[in-house]
Image: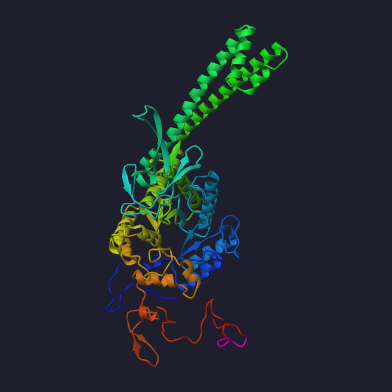
Amino acid sequence: MYEFESGYWHALDKARPQVETSKIGYTTSSIKDQLEELKAKIFTGASHVELGFSGVGKGTIAGGKVTPGLFGKDQREEMRQLSKVNEVSLSTHATTGIMGLSGVTERGGFSENARKNAMDEIKQAIEFNADVGGSATVVHVGEFNRRTGEWIEEGKTVRQGFIDYGEGIPETLVDGRTGDAVISFNKKSRFEIPEIKINPETGHAEIKPIEISPGRDAKTVEEAKDQIINVLRSQVRMEEGRSKDYGRRWESAEKTVDLYDKMPDSQKLEMIRHYAERGKGGEFEEILKLPKIEDALKRGKEILKREAEILKTEAEGFAMRHIQYEKFIDNLKTSKQYGLEKTSDSLAEAGMFAMQQTKDKKLDKPIFVAPENIFPEQYGGHPEELKEIVIKSRKRMQELLKEKGMPEEKAKELSQTHIKATFDTGHAYLWRKYFDPKKTDKDFNKWMLDQADDLVRSKVVGHVHVTDNMGYADDHLPMGEGKVPIERFTEILSKREFKGNVIAEAGDRDFGAEPAAALRGAWKTMGSPMYRVDSMSDLPIPSPGMGRQMGRGWVDIEQSYFGRTTSPTYLVGEKIVPSKDWVFWTEVPLE
């Protein structure tokens, strides 16, 4: 167990901005029993614990697919009481088995069934969080694929200073009526538009295909969409032309049938011979072989009427396709135009549910849904996108509350209370691999810290995850082991008087030979005043046989055994083979 104090005792200590130790939390392993994990994290000295889940639907602890549904009323109450007695606050990370709340599918389209399934998982996590007395309910927002490089949307440059990876991540255009993905394109995608020109030498019209690449050539998402629509328009014109052509031919065929009815039999027979000679079909030749003229004339009319009906059907078919293409074009939307609305609806619904849970269970601390920036390749991974998601979701929740008769100011206050972002430093730093290669780590750090400062200053963020990495993958290194500018980020939290919790995410690091490394790294890097183990004062500590000694500092604790850097004579822990050296005569372990 660690003891913490508020003052510095060493003259050479560097003054650093501080995040209160009581605000630095620790994550559980999402593939283990959360009650046992909570006990273990309390023993590490964490003052806040974030419970987490990995399963979807029906879970199993033995299979590592843990869900909130595996913990009943008694276990939830035990977690609540355990945290209360030990003065440990809680939050909950909804399952990592879902990615986003827009209902995006693997093909890049959107499904209401997928969105409903995701919402069920989020609501389950919110209800669990309320039962254990938590606060933030974290959910990943990876809403849909979009390019990582610089782009212009609605007249505004987004992802400025970033590049696409290779040929770029495919963007999708969807049918706004169904959400189905209909067109996907990136830098290597090619489309052809027919261009008709008159050859001056021959005087004839010639068709030449023109190749376009919206993902490569377009400067804005609207321009790319327009280029693709131009390709579709050429198809529309073709269907329209076919419809008109077959319509004229059908009208002509109907007139021929009317004329045939008015002709004398001799002229009808002459018309049949004419069609047979022009190669109109073998059927007319067969008619001439019939023994009775009456049968031949009757059969001739049947063929003419049938051909008229065929032409009519073709004309109607091309006309229908023309209409369908026109409607298809009119309803064509980008993934953002369609998906962002779905995400806002989902988060507003989750915020309403969190508000109701807070009220129904009379909680002291409000439950809030906390969308977290995830990987750069999905919308929501960029800090500006995270901000946009939160703002739009709050506005949508305000609309829902006002529909229930709530005053606008109260609705605004509640939406800000129950929807707050989670900012993850490790995920944000993954943008480094897409940053302009001509620029330096210093340039990137400035960009990242400016973005973080904007999120905190604008009251969008209510929860923070701190992890470290080298900028290539989400490796969850302990703080200070990678390249993420954690200390400078801490300065922002201090300057902006951030009141939320700061969670040290362990990831796989907590499963191996470095238990609690992420938490210790956060304490150390973020300047928490962890001093004087065995001491509760600034006075020298009396030690039997050794005179009076000063309290110990951080260097006496980090990677030590009870404050000693010498090898221990006895070890405990889940990875250690039990020893019988230190047991009672009953073989009950000493610990």
- Give the side of residue 358 with respect to residue 484, left or right: right
Q: Main secondary structure of the magenta part?
A: loop
Q: Nearer the viewer, residue 310 or 31?
A: 310
- Would you place residue 41 above or below residue 154 in this image? below
| Left or right relative to 541: residue 350 | right
Residue 583 magenta: yes
Identify which residue is drawn at 54% across, 27% down: 317
Residue 508: percent from the left, percent from the top? 48, 68
Q: Position of residue 390 (x, y in %)?
A: 40, 49
Specify the farthest residue to the bottom: 545
**Where does the image place residue 153, in percent across and percent down from the top left?**
35, 44
Which is more toward the observer, 108 or 264? Answer: 264
Q: In the image, what residue occupies the spot 48% across and 73% down?
A: 43
Give the number of marks: 0
Asked if residue 441 shows in the view, the reply is yes
Instruction: Identify the image quadrant of the N terminus.
Output: bottom left
Where does the magenta region start and end?
580-586
Residue 127 vertical placement versus 109 (above, below): below
Q: Is residue 392 left or right of residue 83?
A: left
